[in-house]
Every structure is written in C-alpha cells, then in structure tokens.
C-alpha cells in the first residue's frame, strides 16, 4: 500500500465513515476521490482534485468544463441546502441525441424536461460553501414522508453497518394521503430479521439520520433487483409495489427478483395511522415483515 496513489470511488455516495475507514485502515496520505457523473456523459460533474483538500463525506470540486450547480424546484442556485444536481451550460462531452430518437423527444425528456435548457442529472445533492458536493442519492428515488424530501443515502449508511444485513433497498410507498418509508433487507447467511434487529435498525436510523428516516416497515427479501452495472434499482421496486409498469427490464441483471415485490400482501396489512404504535410480525413463505412506530 505504500505506493498506492489516488483512490477513486464511484457508484453509491461514500459516507464520512467510509472516508475514515480508508484513511485509518488503508493509507493515511492517499487522495480519496469520490466522483459523480455518468456513462452517458463520459465524464464527471464533480470529482477529485490533487491540489485541493479532501473533506470526509464530500466530493472535492466541480469537473473542468462543467458548470455544475444545485437548484431548487424554481431553478434557484442553492448553497448548503439539498436540491437537484444540474449543469447549467453545455459541456464538452454532452451527448446531443439518442439513437432511434429522430425527433429528440426521448433525449429532451431524459435531461431537459424539469428545467428549460438546463441538464438535470437526477442526483439529489448539496453544494457546500467551500465548493464541495455531497450526494444524497438519486433525486427520483428520494422519499417524501410528511411532505419533507429526504435522501436514501442516510438510511443506507446506517443499515449497511449491520453485519446481519447483506444489502438493503428503501422506497417510499404512497399511503393514506402521505408517503411511508419501506425498508427491504437481504439478510446475510445465517442471519434472521427478528424484533430485536428491527428495533436496533430503527434506533440507528433515528440516531444517525432523523426520525423521519425511520421506516414504517422492514421486510426481509430473498434478493434485491439491480442493473447490469451492479446498482440497486429503487425505481423498479417502487413502481411494481404501486402496480405500475416496469420500464426497461432488459437493463436488469436479475429481473426475476422483481416478481417477489409484486402484490406483496405485507404492504397491505397495516391500516393504522402513522402515529399509532404497532409492533407486529407476519411471516410468509419467503418474507418477514415488521411494522414499527414512525415518529413525525
């Protein structure tokens, strides 16, 4: 490890704990470059810089040639607040069209439908006062309990710290004129989802994030669907539990995993308001579900 140079971390947002692990356990003086961009742009909107300091939990700076910004719903630039990661001007590697899209409608819908003439990349992010970027997750996968928009990354950071959890997926379920947080977990070999573990997960989420992040239900599942590039697909699960058609299933590496989430009876069990306590277990052939009180 003595000759290890810059270390690049793509895909999921890297937590402050992740930064600490790299510097404590791998090498204290390497440059840890968390990045965010995409295959479609062949580049990064935000990335590392060898002459700038590294701050835990942050991506260091904007990419060269990228007018990267974070915007609210009205298109106003934000500093220190969560919003949409956007690029407000054309950039060198910006694609100009899609194949088999002669009128450009698919291309415009994918990137320019939200803000006129501004590329919306689909990440939910915060620009810090020092010019760094914190990625909270995909903006189209953010949760909205009680009308407050929150990112999924804060939940994953707490849940994936448990050795009993192999991986997790969280979505928002429309429920009683609101949205409730549903957490699906794939258990590690030999581990079981019992009430003690559910309570520990909820306690960790409440302490490490906020009470709004605490799930209304925790459900053990046999597998979690992911794309061919290895990313979990929250949107496909969210669509299928709401009875909506799944788009682009050919992009999934394990599309068969979606069948488990279709018409899940466990998601129709609770008929109580959010503020009423409930601690109940229902066991099916392949799932265990626990419903917990969600504080508002």
Image (tube, grey):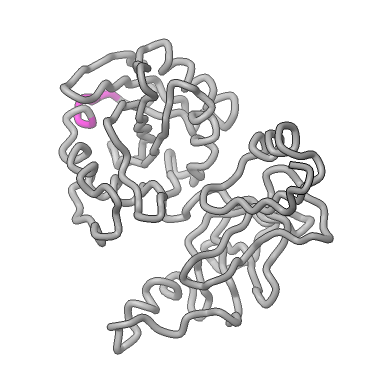
Q: Residue at x 23, y 49 (%)?
A: 255
**Residue 269 drawn in magenta:** yes
Using the image, determine if residue 237 lies above or below residue 59.
above
Left/right of residue 188 with respect to residue 35 in the rendered view: left
Residue 99 at x, y = what percent? Answer: 33, 82
Residue 277 at x, y = what percent? Answer: 36, 16
Q: Which residues are magenta?
A: 267-272
Give whichever of 155, 192 is nearer the camera: 192
Using the image, determine if residue 283 lies above or below residue 120.
above
Left/right of residue 283 with respect to residue 83 in the rendered view: left
Residue 65 at x, y = what percent? Answer: 67, 77
Residue 124 at x, y = what percent? Answer: 53, 54
**Residue 264 drawn in magenta:** no
Left/right of residue 50 with respect to residue 260 in the rendered view: right
* Camera sees residue 101: yes
- Secondary structure character of the magenta stretch overall: loop
Q: Residue at x 46, y 71 (%)?
A: 40
Give whichever of 235, 160 is nearer the camera: 160
Q: Residue at x 69, y 49 (%)?
A: 58
Exactly how many numbered labels are in the figure? 0
């Amino acid at each position: 490890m003595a000759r290890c140079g810059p270390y690049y971390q793509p895909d999921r947002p890297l937590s402050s704990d992740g930064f600490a692990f790299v510097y404590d356990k791998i090498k204290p003086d390497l440059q840890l470059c968390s990045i965010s961009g995409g295959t479609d742009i062949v580049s990064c909107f935000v990335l590392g810089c060898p002459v700038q300091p590294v701050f835990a939990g942050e991506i260091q700076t904007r990419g060269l040639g990228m007018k990267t910004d974070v915007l609210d719903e009205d298109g106003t630039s934000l500093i220190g607040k969560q919003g949409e990661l956007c690029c407000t001007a054309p950039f060198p590697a910006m694609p100009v069209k899609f194949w088999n899209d002669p009128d450009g409608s698919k291309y415009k819908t994918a990137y320019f439908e939200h803000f006129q003439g501004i590329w919306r990349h689909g990440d939910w992010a915060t620009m810090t006062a020092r010019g760094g970027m914190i990625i909270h997750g995909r903006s189209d996968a953010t949760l909205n309990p009680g009308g407050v928009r929150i990112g999924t990354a804060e939940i994953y950071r707490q849940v994936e710290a448990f050795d009993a959890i192999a991986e997790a997926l969280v979505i928002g379920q429309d429920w009683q004129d609101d949205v409730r947080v549903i957490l699906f977990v794939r258990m590690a070999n030999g581990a079981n989802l019992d009430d003690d573990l559910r309570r520990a997960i909820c306690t960790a989420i409440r302490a490490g994030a906020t009470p709004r992040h605490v799930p209304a239900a925790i459900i053990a599942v046999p597998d979690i669907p992911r794309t061919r590039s290895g990313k979990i697909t929250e949107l496909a699960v969210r669509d299928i539990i709401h009875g909506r058609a799944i788009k682009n299933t050919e992009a999934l590496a394990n599309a068969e995993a979606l069948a488990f989430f279709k018409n899940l009876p466990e998601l129709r069990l609770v008929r109580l308001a959010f503020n009423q306590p409930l601690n109940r277990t229902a066991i099916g052939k392949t799932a265990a579900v626990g419903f917990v009180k969600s504080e508002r």
